[in-house]
Image (spheres, rainbow, N blue to C red):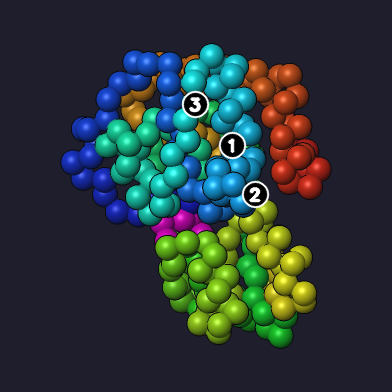
Amino acid sequence: MKRLVIGAVFAALTAGTAFAADTVRMGTEGAYPPYNFVNDAGEIDGFERDVGDKLCEIAKLECTWVKNDWDSIIPNLVSGNYDTIIAGMSITEERDQVIDFTEEYFPADPSSYVGLSSSSDDAITGVVAAQTATIQAAYVATSGATVVEFKTPDETIAAVRSGEADAVLADDAFLKKFVEESGGELKFLGPKVAIGGGIGLGIRESDGELRAKLNVAIQTMKSDGSLNALIAKWFDGRDGGY
């Protein structure tokens, strides 16, 4: 799935505070359906809203939700603006040097290329759009193609439609809806790409107690089938394999 940390988190590394309360602020992007998005009522919605609320119910924690732009989501966790990241974030070695992760609550998802319906598969070797600070952006930069990065995922799709980019690389589950609803304007290109690992909640390194509580809750959801049920609900009947 998504996403890679680019750049240092400088002095914020020492600013986090240890978990000491039963109220947990859940930080998310709110712009990456079906993982997370803002619904018509202005509320955080999606797969991760359902998962996060259920985890807090099991762990007997009160949850509140905080929306934060992707490109600053790790620094603002470390500096204490919220207590978790639950935002389609793949567990990577680079990120794990800055923050801790719970165990995964969603398995590794392939990334896919999408371009205009008139495009050939050669488009994936041209100019490829990706959201900044993602595993996809890092992959394109080493693939031989030219990467052009954008702040939001919607901007990557717009770049393809405008001709600014030949293709976009993102999570397959995110791109699927755009292709299906494009009226034939967009199509998948080339093979799917396996990059990144499963998705976990990001936690400050000082918050081991919170991490342990959430790991127990994740295991409970895997054991009782509720996690697979939510994956099926939001990802067209997909079996999460838990």
* Type of the residue with mark 3: Cys
Q: Residue 113 carries which label?
A: none
Q: In which quarter of the image is the C terminus?
A: top right
| Residue at the far left in the pictured view | 11
Residue to which mark 2 is pinned? 34
Question: Is residue 109 a member of the stretch shown in magenta?
Answer: no
Q: How many other residues sit within 10 Å of disc 3, few (<14), some (14-19) or many (≥20)?
A: some
Region of the chain picked out in magenta, as a range: 132-136
* Quarter of the image where one finds residue 166: bottom right
Q: How far apart are marks 2 and 3 (CA)?
A: 20 Å
Residue drawn at the location 56% of the way across and 82% of the way down: 162
Judged by depth in the image, the label closer to the viewer, 2 or 3, is: 3
Residue 77 drawn above or below residue 34: above
Q: How far apart are marks 1 and 2 (CA)?
A: 10 Å
Residue 194 drawn above or below residue 198: below
Q: In this view, does 239 lie to the left or right of 173?
A: right
Residue to which mark 3 is pinned? 63
* Type of the residue with mark 2: Pro
What is the x, y in percent for residue 76?
A: 32, 42
What is the x, y in percent for residue 63?
A: 49, 26
What is the x, y in percent for residue 122?
A: 63, 81
* Quarter of the image where one finds residue 78: top left
* Type of the residue with mark 1: Arg
Q: Nearer the viewer, residue 4 or 73?
A: 73
Residue drawn at the location 74% of the way across and 32% of the way down: 228
Q: How many other residues sit within 10 Å of disc 1, few (<14), some (14-19) or many (≥20)?
A: many
Asked if labels 2 and 1 touch by Cβ distance under 8 angstroms, the answer is no
Q: Distance between the residues labelled 3 and 1?
A: 10 Å
* Quarter of the image where one finds residue 108: top right
